[in-house]
Amino acid sequence: MNKHPVTASASGHDVYVNLIASLAGQYLSRQPYVLNLVKEVLEPMHLKDQSILIEHDMGRVIRNIDIVETSEQDTIFYAQSNKISFNSRYATIRYTPPLPTLRIVL
């Protein structure tokens, strides 16, 4: 496995990500700034379990929500994002709301 060190938690557990063959690696290649946000959240934490879901309010806007409501009046198109093997649905002239929450799955 190709392990890239992310950080160590306050409890001394090392956290790694597979940048080549994981969904996390695909996401981080398109949004590399998220790696620093993950470090910011995990470093002070005392991790105990191997499988953890963390939702953390960063106290500031870190990204925009990817999903928006659409109606029959919206112009919809399908496109394939970089490094993704399927087409996604996109709406034109839609502004996504800001989001302060980071979700981490370990």
Image (cartoon, rainbow, N blue to C red):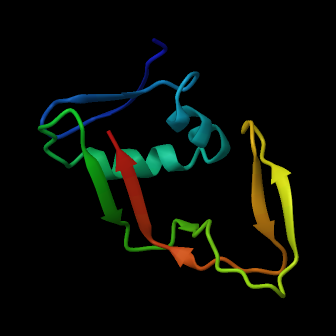
Relative vertical location of residue 93 with respect to residue 78 in this rendering, above or below = below
The residue at the point 78 percent across, 41 percent down is: 82
Residue 39 found in image quarter: top left
- Residue 77 is left or right of residue 23, and the answer is right
Residue 50 sits in quarter: top left
x%, y% of residue 8?
26, 33
Is the N terminus in the top left, top right, bottom left or bottom right quadrant?
top left
Q: Residue furthest top?
A: 1
Q: How many marks?
A: 0
Question: x, y percentage for residue 72?
Answer: 80, 85
Q: Residue at x 65, y 76 (%)?
A: 96
Residue at the image point whose x is 28% and y is 46% from the top: 42
Check the image and report above or below for 15 versus 56.
above
Is residue 59 or residue 54 the one in the foreground? Answer: 54
The residue drawn where x is 78% and y is 65% is 90
Residue furthest to the front: 72
Which quarter shows the C terminus? Answer: top left
Is 57 situated left or right of 66 in this image? Answer: left
Residue 30 percent coordinates (x, y): 67, 44
Would residue 43 be found to the left or right of residue 26 on screen? left
Establish if 19 lies above or below 35: above
